[in-house]
Image (cartoon, rainbow, N blue to C red):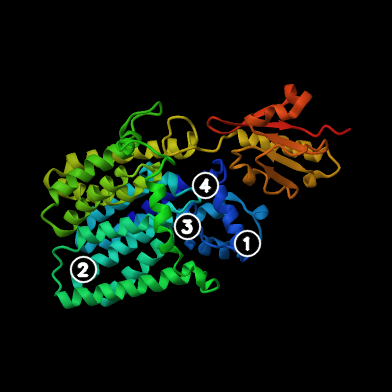
């Protein structure tokens, strides 16, 4: 119990301190505005560019308890706490596999999930990934018990977790399917039991999916919206958006940067491979190994890539790494223990650097298209300008840019804000924020424009009110 408490404390130390200071990512800002739609009873699932509703169904009640009714009242920490809690649930999940893994392997896996930089970093961001991983791991746990014991209750739980995962993010579909392909063979249950378990799981998943996508049947026509997303999501995954070569994940997680060696990537990869080899004769390590291989192949084959998608196979790699620790401790206890402690220390230092001191700096591959710390300077300058005007926070703000996210989050407390992709009439009494493509629209005031970085390579220019 003491070890588990220590793991939770260590995980919190890496995740909690930066919740209010890390710049709000573009995807977080987008999710905050979708959450505002949920609070206003207008949230509807978009099949192409937005993910499932579960994150908003969880965050919405939290905002209401806090008295928040719109994005203007939102703050980063309460939103990000949902991901932190999901990350803690993921970290503790291997302990529920102790029966199949062994106690030492389960504890080692939990320690890796607590300390590894990719998990610590993305557990502190208001995006869908941490919640997705927690639901997927819950599915894997319940599925394995149903596969091994023929438990009908475990089958229903597996279906429920699958439905929750599918209602979180569309990538759950291939992740879940590939686990079934990896884990189903070799099940000791008779065919009739297998079919009944599968039927119970499918029914439970369908009930959860349709209920959540329809917002608890408030919008019945959206109940099967997930299935309509198959075409758009496939086109997105194979299109030109965020397109990278097949080896990009290896580059992100194994190539050294100016911030040093990516310890988490190397430890999880080498340890996971070793755990797969040493545990191959056992059913669960073999299933996890096949799952990891299939996931790497599948996501590497897609042109669409972001660093957080790799968490899908890094999580089972952590479990395999725990198996490696267990097997090595049985053979050379002192050497294995020393090596494990050294790796954890290196990973902890890396996580602290990536999550705290260099959370949005160049070289931090987890900070994919991060928001700039320069946004804080912009917020301060806007507050200074508006406090000096008669209108104050009601000052008109005109944003004219083709790419302005995450500015809506920075400007969320200025109700008189408008956004244009073409140059409108620029009001003299307005604060004008111009993208580089429209800087010339400032006219004579162009020479006095102040520049701010909102994301790497993306600038915005500020023109203060010109009216006397």
How crowded pointer 4 is (Cα within 10 Å; few <14, some 14-19, many 20+) is rated as: some
Taking the spot 80% from the left edge, 40% from the top edge, the residue there is: 387
Residue 277 location (% of width, % of height):
14, 47
Q: Nearer the viewer, mark 3 or mark 4?
A: 3
286 sits to left or right of 438: left
Residue 66 — which label? 1
Q: Residues within 10 Å of mark 2 (few under 14, many from 20)?
A: many
In the rendered structure, find residue 47 and report the number of the disc placed on it.
3
Quarter residue 429 falls in: top right
Circle 2 is placed at which residue position? Answer: 147
Q: Position of residue 409 (x, y in %)?
A: 62, 46
Residue position for label 4: 27
Up-down relation of residue 102 to residue 249 (above or below): below
The percent position of residue 381, horizontal first and vertical second, equals 72, 34
Measured Cα–Cα span from mark 2 to mark 3:
33 Å
At label 3, counting other C-alpha atoms closer than 10 Å, the crowd grade (few under 14, some 14-19, many 20 or more) is some
Q: Earlier in the sequence, mark 2 or mark 3?
A: 3
Q: Quadrant of residue 133?
A: bottom left
- Real-space Cα distance between discs 1 and 4? 23 Å
Residue 426 to residue 220: above or below: above
Label 4 element class: helix
In the image, 198 versus 114, the foreground residue is 198
- Dot 1 or dot 4: first in sequence order is 4
Q: In the image, which is nearer the foreground, mark 3 or mark 1?
A: 3
């Amino acid at each position: 119990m003491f070890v588990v408490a220590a793991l939770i404390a260590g995980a919190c130390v890496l995740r909690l301190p930066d919740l209010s200071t890390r710049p709000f990512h573009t995807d977080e800002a987008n999710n905050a505005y979708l959450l505002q739609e949920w609070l206003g009873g207008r949230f509807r699932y978009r099949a192409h560019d937005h993910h499932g509703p579960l994150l908003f169904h969880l965050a919405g009640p939290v905002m209401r308890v806090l008295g928040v009714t719109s994005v203007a009242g939102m703050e980063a920490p309460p939103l990000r706490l949902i991901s932190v809690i999901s990350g803690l649930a993921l970290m503790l999940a291997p302990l529920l596999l102790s029966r199949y893994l062994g106690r030492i392997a389960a504890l080692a896996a939990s320690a890796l999930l607590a300390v590894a930089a990719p998990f610590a970093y993305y557990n502190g961001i208001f995006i869908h990934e941490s919640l997705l991983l927690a639901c997927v791991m819950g599915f894997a746990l319940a599925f394995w018990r149903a596969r091994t014991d023929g438990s009908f209750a475990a089958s229903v739980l597996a279906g429920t977790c699958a439905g929750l995962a599918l209602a979180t993010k569309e990538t759950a579909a291939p992740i879940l399917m590939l686990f079934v392909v990896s884990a189903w063979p070799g099940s000791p249950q008779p065919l009739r039991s297998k079919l009944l378990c599968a039927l119970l799981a499918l029914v439970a998943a369908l009930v959860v999916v349709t209920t959540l996508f329809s917002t608890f049947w408030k919008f019945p026509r959206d109940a099967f919206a997930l299935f309509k997303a198959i075409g758009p999501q496939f086109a997105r995954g194979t299109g030109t958006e965020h397109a990278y070569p097949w080896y990009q994940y290896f580059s992100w997680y194994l190539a050294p940067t100016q911030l040093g060696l990516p310890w988490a990537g190397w430890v999880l990869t080498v340890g996971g491979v070793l755990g797969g080899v040493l545990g191959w004769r056992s059913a669960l390590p073999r299933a996890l190994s096949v799952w990891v291989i299939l996931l790497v192949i599948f996501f590497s084959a897609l042109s669409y890539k972001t660093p957080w998608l790799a968490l899908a196979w890094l999580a089972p790699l952590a479990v395999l790494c725990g198996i490696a620790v267990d097997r090595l401790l049985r053979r050379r206890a002192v050497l294995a223990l020393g090596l494990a402690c050294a790796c954890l220390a290196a990973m902890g230092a890396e996580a602290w650097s990536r999550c705290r001191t260099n959370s949005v700096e160049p070289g931090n591959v987890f900070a994919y298209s991060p928001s700039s710390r320069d946004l804080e300077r912009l917020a301060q300058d806007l507050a200074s300008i508006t406090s000096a005007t008669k209108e104050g926070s009601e000052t008109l703000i005109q944003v004219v840019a083709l790419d302005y996210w995450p500015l809506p989050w920075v400007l969320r407390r200025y109700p008189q804000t408008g956004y244009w992709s073409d140059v409108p009439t620029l009001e003299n009494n307005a604060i004008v924020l111009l993208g580089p493509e429209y800087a010339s629209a400032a006219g004579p005031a162009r020479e006095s424009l102040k520049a701010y970085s909102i994301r790497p390579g993306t600038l915005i220019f500020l023109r203060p009110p010109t009216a006397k």
